[in-house]
Image: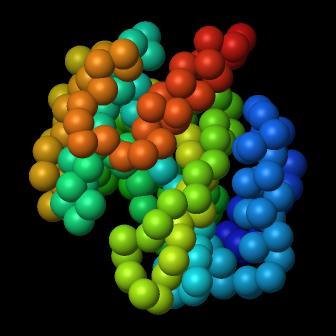
Amino acid sequence: MTLHRRARDLLASWTAPNPEQERLRADFVAFLDEYPDGVTRECAPAHLTASALVVDPGARRVLLVLHGKVRRWLQPGGHLEAVDASAAEAALREAREETGIAELTLAAHGLPVRLDRHAAPCRPGVVDHHLDVQFVAVAPSGAIPVIDHESLDGRWFDHDDLPEPIGADIADFVAAARARLAAAP
C-alpha cells in the first residue's frame, strides 16, 4: 500500500472531534482523491504535511521550536518523505529530527489529534497551503532538546504560558492535545 493510500485511509476513517475538524477531514480526503501526488512536497497548490506536539510525560509542558523561516514558535513537523510508511511516522521522524530527542513515542494510539490548513512557507507563490495532520508525541522524563539547523531555538513551556510570537493555531493544538490525552484510558 502506498503512503498516499495509507494517508487517505487514515483520514477517511479518523473521527473528528468537532464539526470544524470534520470539515477539514472531508476537505483533506477530497484533496487526496483529486491529487495522487498530494503527499509529496512537489504537489501544488497544496500538499499533506505531518507534525507532532511534543509533551513531557505528565503533559504539563510542551516543547516548541522557533522556526527559522517563519520566526514563530511552532510544533516540530514537515513534509512526508519516501522513507515514511505513514503520516504518523513522518510526524515522529520530523519531531525527532527537530528536537534531537530520539526516544519520542506517539500518544493517542498514534492517531491524529487535529488537522490544520495553513499558508505554506516552502514554496511561496507555487504552494498555497500545507494540509497538516497533527499528532502528539511524548518525550521521556528529563529530555533536553538539541535543536537542528532549521530552528533558531527550542524550549519547554507550560501549556498555560506559551511564548510569543507563536504560530496562529498552536494554542488550539495544545488544547486539543490536552483534551485528547485527558480522555485517553
Q: Quadrant of the N terminus?
A: bottom right
Q: Quadrant of the C terminus?
A: top right
Answer yes or no: is residue 173 visible: yes
Name the residue at 68% across, 70% down.
3
**Residue 113 image-quadrant placement:** top right
Answer yes or no: is residue 101 visible: no
Seen as rendered, the residue at the extreme right is 13
Name the residue at 49% across, 82% down.
127
Q: Position of residue 173 (x, y in %)?
A: 52, 35
Q: Nearer the viewer, residue 79 or 171?
A: 171
Q: Position of residue 82 (x, y in %)?
A: 53, 75
Name the residue at 38% across, 82% down.
124
- Give the number of marks: 0
Q: Is residue 80 left or right of residue 2?
A: left
Q: Position of residue 5 (x, y in %)?
A: 78, 70
Residue 115 sits above or below residue 173 on the image: below
Q: Is residue 29 left or right of residue 180?
A: right
Residue 51 sits above or below residue 112 on the image: below
Name the residue at 62% across, 12% down.
182
Q: Nearer the viewer, residue 133 or 137?
A: 133
**Residue 162 image-quadrant placement:** top left
Q: Is residue 125 left or right of residue 73?
A: right
Q: Nearer the viewer, residue 115 or 79?
A: 115
